[in-house]
Image (cartoon, grey):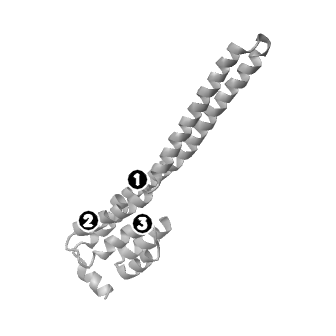
Amino acid sequence: NRRLWAELAPLIQAGNFRKAMEVAEQQDTALSTIMRYGMSRISTAHRREDIEKAMEESLIEVIPRLEKRTHYLATLANIGMLMGLLGTVIGLINAFAAVAAVNPAEKAAMLSASISVAMNNTALGLGLAITLLLPIVILGGIEGATRLFWRDGALPLFTPLQGQEERWLVTNP
């Protein structure tokens, strides 16, 4: 997206919308989708708000693609955590059963083995949950960055173009 932005921004500022549209159409990224929606309205837009609404429409298409499978990751993280908890409970049950049923000479060995099982399950469950939550955080950051880019980066780029629809028609027959 950064490389695409570095290529698109000067083209749009120079008023070379046709070339900017060609560059955006060669990519299938969130940024290119947002920019294509905005640039497609330049020739028909009478106000900046028209371009803004077109770019908002693109967010309706882009954001669900970013969020498409994050709920699966959250579900798997929760399952991993619960499996760790289940293993911990089973390990502790075995530990208490060992203390009650085994002769005193073997109690310490059985107790430590059962507590080891409990703690290993806890560690594995937490490790799985943390590992699966990291992509959720990253994808949430990408989604937030996409929204911020639209508001703070792409949209202001079109502000000086307000009232220059004839320029679009001249440079992009």
153 or 13, which lies in front?
153
Horizontal arrangement in the rendering, residue 40 relative to residue 108 (left or right): left
**Most distant residue in the right direction:** 105
Q: Nearer the viewer, residue 48 or 57?
A: 57
What distance separates the C-alpha of mark 2 from that of mark 1?
Answer: 18 Å
Q: Earlier in the sequence, mark 3 or mark 1?
A: 3
**Helix, strand or loop status at disc 1:** helix
In whole angstroms, how far apart are the C-alphas of marks 3 and 1? 13 Å
Residue at numbered disc 1: 144
Residue at (70, 18) in percent of width and height = 98
| Residue 53 position within the rendered picture, expressed as x and y whole percent measured from the top left | 26, 65
Q: Is residue 76 visible?
A: yes
Say which residue appears at 37% left-offset and 82% top-offset: 18
The label number, if any, that marks residue 126 in the structure image: none
Three-letter code, disc 3? Leu
Mark 3: secondary structure: helix
Q: Which residue is mark 2?
A: 53
**Which residue is drawn at the image coordinates 39% and 63% (left, top)?**
62
Precedes in sequence: disc 2 or disc 3: 3
